[in-house]
Amino acid sequence: MRIVFFLLETLFFFLIAAALLRAWMNHLRVHMSAQPGRLAMAVTDWLVVPLRRVLPRGLAQSRIDWGSLVAALLLAVAYGLLWLLLATAASAAPFTAEASVMLVFTMALRILARTLLQGLMILLIGYAILSWVQPQSPVMGTLDRLCAPILRPVRRIVPLVGGVDLSVLVLIILLQVGLMLLG
C-alpha cells in the first residue's frame, strides 16, 4: 500500500507544482512560451482553462492568476479525498464524518505547503547550478526572474562572502527546515 500512496503523492505533487508554477510565472509576467512555462501549461490546461471560464470576470483582470491557484487548491483537495479513500480501504476502522473532513483538509494543506517548499527548492537548485555551470544559458534568465523575488529579502541580510552569493544556500536551508517542520 505504501507504493500506491507514494505514486499518488508523486502524481499530485507534479500537478500541483505545475499549477503553482503557472500562477507564479503569470504573476511575474514571465512569458509562458519559454520553459518551464510550456510544460506548466501543457500539464494544467485541462483544469485551468475551464476554471477561468467559471471564475468571475473581475478575478480574471487582477494580477493574480486565480485560475491556476484554484486549480492547485482543487488538486490538493482531490489528493486529500483519494488519500482518505485509500486509508479507509487499508484500515478496518472507518473514519467519522468530522474526522474525514479534517483529514482531507489537513492532507490538502500539507501537500500544498510541501509542494510549495519543494518546488522552490527545485527552482533554487536549478538556478544555483546553472549560475555556476552555464550562466549565459537562455533558461537562466527565466530562472533569475522566478527566483529573484524570493532571494531579494535574503540577499539584504546575507552578505557576499569572498564574492560568492550564499543567499541561495541560506534559503535552501530555510526551506529544508520548513519541510522538516511539516513532517
Image (cartoon, grey):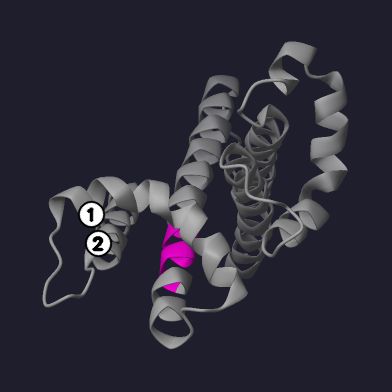
Residue neighbourhood size for the residue with mark 2, other residues' Cα within 10 Å, grouped as few (<14), some (14–19), many (≥20) = many
Task: Decide if residue 69 is on the left or right side of residue 107.
Answer: right
Residue sitting at x 78%, y 55%: 43
**Which three-letter amino acid code belongs to the residue tagged 2?**
Ser
The residue depicted at 52 percent of the width and 46 percent of the height is: 111
Q: Is residue 88 above or below residue 65?
A: below
Measure the alpha-carbon separation of dots 1 and 2. Answer: 6 Å
Q: Is residue 123 above or below residue 114?
A: below
- Taking the image as drawn, is residue 69 in sight? yes
The secondary structure type at the circle numbered 2 is helix
Which image quadrant: the N terminus? Answer: bottom right
Residue hosting label 2: 167
Q: Main secondary structure of the magenta part?
A: helix
Residue 63 placed where, x, y %? 61, 27
**Left or right of residue 69, residue 169 in this image:** left
**Magenta stretch?**
118-125
Residue type of the residue flagged with mark 1: Arg
Rendering coords of residue 123 (x, y %): 48, 63
Does the residue at mark 1 contact the one at mark 2 (Cβ under 8 Å)?
yes
Q: Residues within 10 Å of mark 1 (few under 14, many from 20)?
A: some
In the image, 26 versus 20, the foreground residue is: 26
Q: Residue reaching furthest front?
A: 136
Q: Which residue is mark 1?
A: 155
First reached walking from the N terminus: tag 1 or tag 2: 1
**14 vs 172, nearest the viewer:** 172
- Compared across the picture, whether 91 is left or right of 51 comes to left
Residue located farthest toward the bottom when viewing the structure as drawn: 133
Residue drawn where x is 23% and y is 54% of the image: 155
Q: Position of residue 54 (x, y in %)?
A: 85, 20
Q: Is residue 56 visible?
A: no
Q: Is residue 26 above or below residue 56?
A: below
